[in-house]
Amino acid sequence: MTDNELLSLRNLGKTSVQWLRATGIHTTEELRRRGPVAAYCAVRSRGFGASRTLLFAIAGALQDVHWNQLDPTYKQQLLQQLEEQQK
């Protein structure tokens, strides 16, 4: 594991990586294991003011695409999963 592993992923900058690390996510494998929705929820539960863009950024990072290029159907599925998780 390198300290810059998450920073090398598309869509993730210093702040989002710091937030992920604060939740215990330090590697791409840990991020993949948690998945975009759980990782986003973990960041929010720590009190960080992440917008839903972070959710899409994480999903895009795991697919190596810019978050704006995610399939709209997939984005909707992520939002539905998020809604279910927040109930």
Image (cartoon, grey):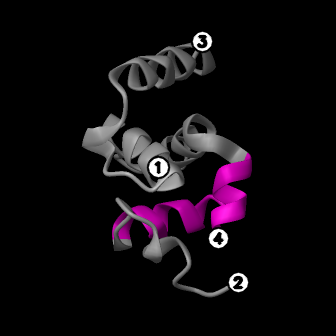
Figure quadrant of the C terminus? top right
Q: CA distance from mark 3 to mark 2?
A: 35 Å
For the magenta stretch, what is the residue range? 15-33
Circle 4 residue: 26
Select label 3 or label 4 by which is in front: 4
Crowd around label 2: few <14 · some 14–19 · many ≥20 (10 Å):
few
Instruction: State the image quarter where residue 28 is shown.
Output: bottom right
Pick whichever of labels 1 and 4 is earlier in the sequence.
Answer: 4
Q: CA distance from mark 2 to mark 1?
A: 19 Å
Question: Marks 1 and 3: CB-CB under 8 Å?
Answer: no
Which residue does the image show at 52% across and 23% down from the upper left?
Answer: 82
Q: CA distance from mark 2 to mark 4?
A: 8 Å
Q: CA distance from mark 1 to mark 3?
A: 21 Å
Question: Marks 2 and 4: CB-CB under 8 Å?
Answer: yes
Question: Furthest-left residue in view?
Answer: 68
Question: Marks 3 and 2: CB-CB under 8 Å?
Answer: no
User: What is the x, y in percent for residue 70?
Assistant: 36, 36
Circle 1 residue: 58
Above-or-below relation of 27 to 43: below
Question: Furthest-bottom residue in view?
Answer: 2
Instruction: Residue type at mark 1: give it.
Output: Ile
